[in-house]
Amino acid sequence: MAVWDDQAWRILATRHLTLAREAGALSELPLAVRSRILLHAHAGELAEGAALIAEARAAAAATGTQLGPYGALGIAAFLGHEAEAAELIQATMDGVTSRGEGRGVTSQYAAALLYNGLGRHDRALTAAELASQYDDIGVLGWSLTELIEAAARTGQPARASDALRRLSQTTRASGTDWALGTEARSRALLSEGQTAENCYREAIERLGRTRMRPALARARLLYGEWLRRENRHRDARAELRTAHALMGTEAFADRARRELQAVGGTVQEARIAQLATDGRTSTEIGAQLFLSTRTIEWHLSKIYTKLGVSSRQELRHALARTHLAQTIRAGPDR
């Protein structure tokens, strides 16, 4: 974790858990399961990670272990479940404070991840700065990446630059694609013009060679957001659709969806309406447009409201009576 070696982390986490289970080492099992849960979370395997939470709790209860619920907290933060994550963060902070465990403060990394995903960058910045005060093995680099994004998004480049300097000390030493891809993504947030674009492309290329799917999806999301601000709407849509399709986290997926709306959602509605009247299912439409079935249904509900219909059959008749571009499309496609 500390040296950004995703392949070795997977091998060692798997071996650790296997040995603990085979030996019946209940005191070791919560640690082994927690590491595996975090690995699943960073690889976008959230269902697999969530399935291990009950085992971690059972092992901790059987041995009286006072280990914080870091695995469950990580999953909740990646999913963007604010209420659940906030409760776990508070419980963790209360527990580690009473026991004098300074390391527990790194639970604020999960808070930073959560709030960056939700687009509440001011709260993410506060949490990331607290977590980044401690040189915790494996977590410091993650906290710094959240700090950089939060500071950049709240217009505080000096704080972001200092965090990038600290981050690069570990990523450059590591040299893995996960490390250098993460650094490139972070550096892009503080760059402009061609330099920013080159950094985003490097991040996507490097992270695409790893198993860390959420990291790759975030790189594409940030690149898409940057392209939209550069008024390159067609390019932005391509990146944002890919980011949305890769996302296994609800909060970041919602960010991608909002960005897609900003770069021509009404034009997209016209395409969805046409595919729906052609007899395509929401799943088929989603696969073609790189959107989730839930997003397709959300767009269709908006289209129904605009046209005053309540079903696909009525939609077909309505489109036959009116010019779709005049009814749905609100602006030029760029």
Image (cartoon, rainbow, N blue to C red):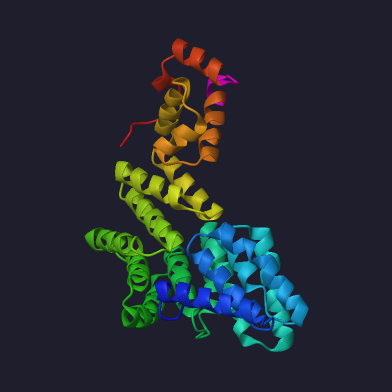
In the image, is 104 to the left or to the right of 241? Answer: right
Q: Is residue 309 shown in magenta?
A: yes
Quarter of the image for the C terminus: give it. Answer: top left
Q: Nearer the viewer, residue 293 or 6?
A: 6
Q: Is residue 317 shown in magenta?
A: no
Q: Residue at x 32, y 50 (%)?
A: 227
| Res 278 quadrant in image | top left
Q: What's drawn in magenta, residue-wise?
A: 305-311
Residue 259 coordinates in the image, percent (x, y)? 44, 46
| Res 68 quadrant in image | bottom right
| Res 118 quadrant in image | bottom right
Q: Residue at x 39, y 75 (%)?
A: 158
Q: Nearer the viewer, residue 75 or 7?
A: 7
Can residue 147 be seen from the camera position used here?
yes
Q: Residue at x 30, y 50 (%)?
A: 230
- Residue 154 position (above or below residue 131): above
In the image, is 256 to the left or to the right of 209? Answer: right
In the image, is 67 to the left or to the right of 106? Answer: right
- Residue 230 position (above or below residue 144): above
Residue 166 coordinates in the image, percent (x, y)? 39, 81
Residue 231 coordinates in the image, percent (x, y)? 31, 46
Can residue 126 be seen from the camera position used here?
no
Residue 264 coordinates in the image, percent (x, y)? 39, 37
